[in-house]
Structures are given as structure tokens and as C-alpha cells.
Image (cartoon, grey):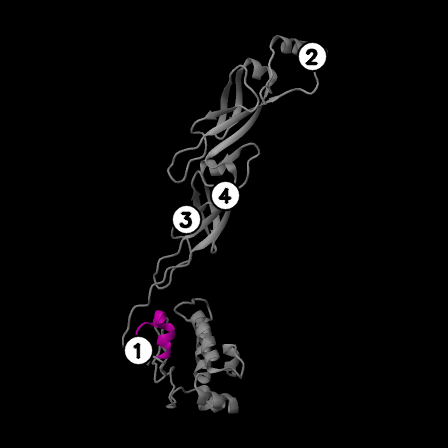
Amino acid sequence: MAKPDPYTVLGVSRGAGEEDIKRAFRKLARQYHPDVNKSRGAETRFKEISEAYEILGDPEKRRRYDMFGHEGVHGDFSGFGSSSARDPFAGMRFGNSGFSFNYGNFTGASGSGVFDDLFSEFLGGRSGRTRRRPTQMRGQDVEYDLTIDFEQAYGGVTAEVRVLDKRIEVHVPPGVDTGSRVRVSGQGAPGLHGGPPGDLYLNVSVTPHEYFRREGADIHLTVPITFGEAVLGGTVEVPGPDGRLALRIPPGTSSGTSFRFRGKGFPNLKDKTRGNFYVTVHVAVPENIDSESRRLVTEFERRNPFNPRKGR
């Protein structure tokens, strides 16, 4: 079977410089290293990447490859025992995946093996002389946009979300509003080398209610009442955020008067206090009244002289 072209494997052009080749190798090697990438074919892909860099990372081997192809590099690329200054792949074997490296004479600017420079978090140690455990890395945090309705924001809700190909039940506390950010500990991306997972952050949006209006922790509602209820007073039933409420209207109530139900608003996420529920009444007048009603209203106005615009 023909060996793959190392330039194609690394994704570089034939005129690529040494730094371009090294950069391409770093990127691909980190992506397909068997200690990180557990997918099928990753190990084979990593070997191809390593073999390609063995050729292109050595000026002499690269020159021979450019002239004669794989046959020019130790006879069909079968031996890595060259004594020409670079031999990073002799005796391949890596840590947890069944391989490890004899770093040979391939050294970076610091004097340590190039694979130590690139993969110390994967392989550990310096040039194979001192082993250490791979550095634990915390997983990345994940964000999820969650939309809930007004009632769910008022009372809290347990919702199921799909994150990173898994379904998670999350609890949204009472009192959240559009713009709230809820942290779900440990439900982000998994960590590397036994590191802790990241967190999941829910970016909450709350849909408006048909009747209720929210201002901070307070809830507002406008309720129409009749002319007679405004003049004579009475008790009317109004919808509340958690059930029906009885609103007592004193005689002589004007349109625009507000009444407060203490502690019937949203819970405050910071101090667990609750806002209030405010009901504002609006006196509704019928469009069509009969002649007798008009006479009675006229008599009412005569008997009860009142100018609400006086002094304005």
C-alpha cells in the first residue's frame, strides 16, 4: 500500500517553511493524540502525522523525499534509525495509549525533546528521563439559552435540557428574570486527565404575561371596575400570580387608584424577600346608556357637585 504524501498529511504546501510545518504538526498532533482522542482511527491518524513530521521536520530527510519520494527515506520509510541529528520516533510507544517515545536527538531550543515541548501534558516528564503525571485540566464551561414563561419564573421550574449529547434535568429557582444566569455545577464539558468538569450556565429569557407586568420583584395588574363599584364600593375578585384574590374597593374610589398585596410579588434572588402585587383600578363607563340612566346621572351630578379639575 502506497505511503501517504507527508505534505498532504500535514496539510502544508511543498514550499512551506520549518515553522509552518511545525505549527501544522502541533495542531494535528494535539487533535489526534491517542491519550486525548478516543475515537476510532485517531491512533492510525496520529501515526501518519508523526511519520509525516519525521520526514518534513528533518531537512535532510525532506530533501531526499522531495527528490526520490519515500524510497529516498530509508527504503520505503521503514526505518527511523538515522544518525543525521534527528530521530524522534525510534522505539515508538505512548503513555496511556500503549505507545511511548524514545526522543532520540531531536531537541528544541530549551534542550528538551520536541515532544516534551509539545505534549508534556499528555506524556509527562522530560526527554523520557523523568516521568510525571499528566496535568489535570478542568473542562470548559457550557452555555445554554433557556426560555420559560411568567408563571415558571414566579414559582420556579425543573426543566430538561440537552447539552453535549446528554439530557440533564436543571432546576430554575423562583424569581429569575430575562437576563438571569443560572449556574449548574459540574454539568459542563468533561475535564482532561481526571480534571473536574466545567459548569453549565443557563441564560434565561422569560416570556411576557398577557395581563401581569413585572417591575423588578413587583407585579402590576390593571383591573376595570364599574361606575357603581367606584361610587358605592364593594369587593371584586381579581387574578393573582398564584391564585384568585379578593380586592376590597372603598366607596368613592377614583380611576387609577392602586392597591397593594404585600409579599405577593416575585422572590428576590439575593435576599429571599418578596416583592408586592399592585392592582390598579380603572373605572369603565358603558358606551350606550338609556335616557332614564342619563336623567339619573344628571341628578346625581346636581346633588353631588364635584370638580376634579379644580386648581389645575
> Split into 4 quadrants, where in the image is the C terminus?
top right
Q: Give the extent of the magenta segment.
A: 112-128
Confirm or deny contact between disc 3 and disc 2 (CB under 8 A).
Answer: no
Give the number of the mark in front: 1 or 4. Answer: 4
Question: Which amino acid lies under the numbered mark 2 shown in the image of this protein?
Answer: Arg
Q: Mark 1 highlights which residue?
A: 128
The disc label shown at residue 294, or none: 2
Q: In the displayed structure, does residue 94 sit left or right of residue 161? A: left
Q: CA distance from mark 1 to mark 4?
A: 54 Å
Instruction: Classify mark 2: helix, strand or loop.
Output: helix
Give the crowd class for mark 2: few <14, some 14-19, many >=20 residues within 10 Å: few
Q: Residue furthest right?
A: 291
Question: Which amino acid lies under the numbered mark 4 shown in the image of this protein?
Answer: Thr
Q: Mark 4 highlights which residue?
A: 178
Confirm or deny contact between disc 1 and disc 2 (CB under 8 A).
Answer: no
Confirm or deny contact between disc 4 and disc 2 (CB under 8 A).
Answer: no
